[in-house]
Amino acid sequence: MTSALKKGTLNPMKSGFDIIGLGLRCLAVAVFALFTGCQPAVSPQPKAAETQPSAPPPPASINPAYVAAHPERWRPVEGESLNPEGAQDAAAQLEAIGYLQGSTPPPARSGVLVHDATRTDTGYNLYTSGHAPEAVLMDSEGKPLHVWRKAFLDVWPELKDTPHQPQMSYWRHVHCFPDGSLLAIFDGIGLIKLDRDSNILWKALNQAHHDLDVAPDGDLYVLTRDAHIVPQLHPSAPILEDYFGVLSSDGKEKKRVSLLECLSHSDKPALLDACKGRAGDLFHTNAIRWLDGRSAGLRPEFSKGRLLTSIRELDAVAVIDLEQARAVWVFQEKFKRQHDPTLLENGHLLLFDNRGPVSGSAVLEFDLANLQRVWTFEGSTARPFYTESCGSAQRLANGNTLILESDRGHAFELTPDGTVVWEFFNPHRAGERQQFIATLFQLERISAAQVAFLEARPTSG
């Protein structure tokens, strides 16, 4: 009798397994490569693929504690043609996909290299990078003002025997509250909340990844994922399916809606048709934004309470209605493998385009009324601009744009005419010999009101 993984189910046969040995790890990698046609990364390379398989976790899931906490989400399914152990090992490999902690040689100088105080927007800079599981709050001169840090095993000591994965070593995305508490994502593993002194307030092993947002009512919106077989897309190999999770302010899950279901209910069925017969990371959803309704006058699909998201592998930006479990708006243009869609105060859409131009990356601004580009930033021969992974663009209050070139550990602020008035290279390093500049996963400008706790204690960490 054979069985296989299926959406919404778990095969409990594997949940009690001990940590797999080296031989079984190699077998799991081989199975994963067979299913997906991919080879695991051997060592970081400049401009490497955004996601790289790492050493596999226990075969049941991203970690045994997650399986034990959520047995209701999996069950054995009869009649499939794949050996369940092979399917589960391949699924585990998918869930272990993470980012390179560094891939580019560092520049000769690091820190803040340019700061035109008369034209730089005010506020503080909050960033995370591949060097450590921490977030740094610094001023525009580059002086650290506060650091939050919490190691993976300090959060989940019960997972001490889990094989190491790169995403255990850094935080992918964070959100700071005025009281100094912080939300942080261990990519593909879970979400934590710390107080301003980095004490754990709560933790959730929910396979959170990439991004989160906080609504005015305190609800949290976060991307989560599962690897399993979805027969209508591939009969025997697992896909990595993304979900939109809604959590209460204390980290309890209130709702969970599948991206796959939302796309199946959209008016662009060809999006899923292109996925049939394929396996692996088919969607790679990398952004989640709660919509406040500011653009509903331009496009009614952008009504309050819906979500704006980016689906990297489909080169698409979409608006999701969680109540209908439907993608109500899907936008595709010439951008490719994009990140960080953001609605501006004027109702326009700002987007980081990783591969759209002939060479290099770009930042694009679209008028939602007619979907025409109204502003573009691209690099030049004298000043190349490219990041294979991540990347972001933030329109600041003074009209400047803060751009993150993640792979190079580089951030810079541009005036509307393209003048660089602030520039920062990550001072942290990554790699076995510290030979790479650490990837900047996030760098955003936040106002003094967002870090009011600094007034009570100006420095910490």
Image (tube, rainbow, N blue to C red):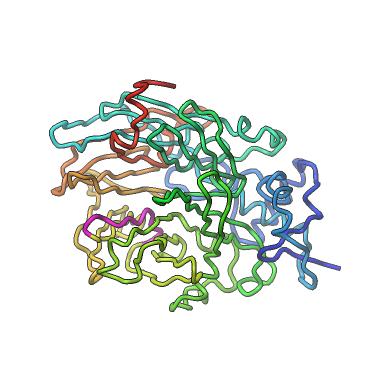
The quarter holding residue 425 reads top left
Which residue: 58% across, 68% down? 278
Left/right placement of residue 386 relative to residue 62 reads: left
Q: Residue at x 52, y 55 (%)?
A: 246
Q: Is residue 220 magenta?
A: no
Q: Is residue 394 left or right of residue 180?
A: left
Which x, y percent locates residue 172? Answer: 48, 42
Region rendered in magenta: 336-346
Q: Position of residue 238 (x, y in %)?
A: 65, 63
Q: Residue furthest right?
A: 1
295 vs 426, left or right, is: left
Quadrant that contains the N terminus = bottom right
Q: Measured from the top left, where is residue 109 in percent x and y?
A: 31, 27
Viewed as shown, does residue 428 lie left or right of 447? right
The C terminus sits in image quarter? top left
Q: Judge whether 71 appears above or below 173 on screen.
A: below
Name above or below for residue 91 compared with residue 119: below
Q: Position of residue 52 (x, y in %)?
A: 55, 48
Relative vertical location of residue 386 with respect to residue 318 in this rendering, above or below? above
Q: Quadrant of residue 72?
A: bottom right
Please report the residue visible at 42 percent of the width from the left and 47 percent of the height from the top.
47
Residue in the foreground of this view, choosing between 461 and 295: 295
Can you say whether 46 is above or below 312 in the image? Answer: above
Looking at the rendered structure, the number of numbered marks drawn on it comes to 0
